[in-house]
Amino acid sequence: MALTVFGKHAINVVKLKPMEYHQRVQNRAAQTVAVINSHLPTLKVAGVDATGLQAQRVALSGLAQGRDDALANADTANNAEQLACRQIRNLVVDLPKNVEGELSNREPAEAALLDLLAPAYAINPRTTALALQRGMILKSALVKINTYLAAQTPVRGPISSASKGVADLAALMDAQPARQQAAKDKAADVSSARTALATATTTVDRLNKRFYAKLQSEGRSNPALAAAMTQILTESANLPGTLSIDAIVQGGTEHLHLLVSYAKHSYNDSNTNVIEWLVAGVDNDFTHSAAADPSGNPLGPSAVGQTVKLRTRVTKRQWHHDGQRPHADDPAAVRVGFVFDKQGWQAW
């Protein structure tokens, strides 16, 4: 899995993560293959022998890499779409202000031009769709206003904000639908890659268990095989699933917050779900935390240029046999999610 890295920075995945479900299945398959090859090399399950099990085990790594690549691509596309949306919003808010500074409502011709902005002011650009709607109205008004300014003596320059004008606004708006579609396409790729990995992992897991059952049966009359089977780790520790981060964008106050969202399939409200983070060079450990909200979490603010690492933690409390909830000091199964780097905050 990858983290969105904001602004112009490339995605950086920190290779610090706990063992995932597919990796535990891979490890058990490797242990199973070793036992089969040493003690019962002709053993097969549903036509699959040790070589076949090993091949399926290895294939999981490729599928996991494909999922990670898909997530990285999705983060890049999502970040590009979010960045362009913020640029559009900034322009549709700032350009009208500069029009008001340039034109005077005491001049009839200029007052009429100022009136062209009224429909744009009626739209609050709180969403991408509304920002585009306001931008279309503003673009038409700016063309007329710039034409008027160019006809003055002396010539008055076109309306702009931070050296960006109507042409820049039009270019951003024209390209935004393609960016939105790219983000949706990449999200679909992530879903497909996750499904492929999960399906293949389940297949190998079932093979592991079927091979184990056959080995157990053979081991009743084969002491050496029975002893070797202790090498196969079957205990899963009843670990909860990983809370997967779906996307992270830069936003909030001054655009210095992390806006974290989670993959819906990975959130289980029967567990305790927490998002943890640290600021590199400031914190020695993940000292900051918040309860993970299924609708997402705003984290921060952080300073421009800081590197922030994030991870998820899921705790699954055990139930007593009498059906009572566990006490606070009872042992719990804990799953720590991936660790991500968010590098180089951009100033907006």
Image (cartoon, rainbow, N blue to C red):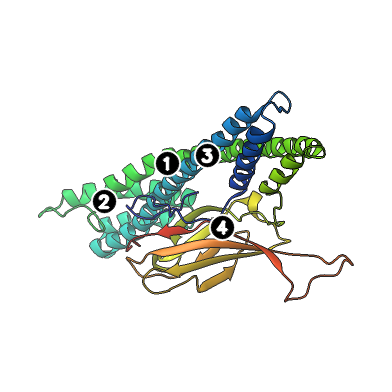
- Give the CA separation, mark 2 to mark 1: 21 Å
Q: Secondary structure at mark 2?
A: loop
Q: How packed is label 3: few (under 14 Cα within 10 Å), some, or many (20 or more)?
A: some
Q: Nearer the viewer, mark 3 or mark 1?
A: 3
Q: Secondary structure at mark 4?
A: loop
Give the image location of residue 166, x and y in percent. 28, 48
Q: Is residue 221 above or below residue 343?
A: above
Q: Secondary structure at mark 1?
A: helix
Name the residue carrying label 4.
337
Give the image location of residue 232, x and y in percent. 67, 46
Name the residue carrying label 2.
165
- Give the CA separation, mark 2 to mark 4: 44 Å
Give the image location of residue 247, x and y in percent. 50, 52
Q: Amino acid at mark 1?
A: Arg
Q: Are marks 4 and 1 in contact (CB under 8 Å)?
A: no
Along the viewing direction, whichever of 27 and 217 lies nearer the viewer? 217
Name the residue carrying label 1.
179
Give the image location of residue 145, x and y in percent. 26, 51
Q: Which mark is residue 144?
A: none
Q: Give the residue furthest to the right.
A: 322
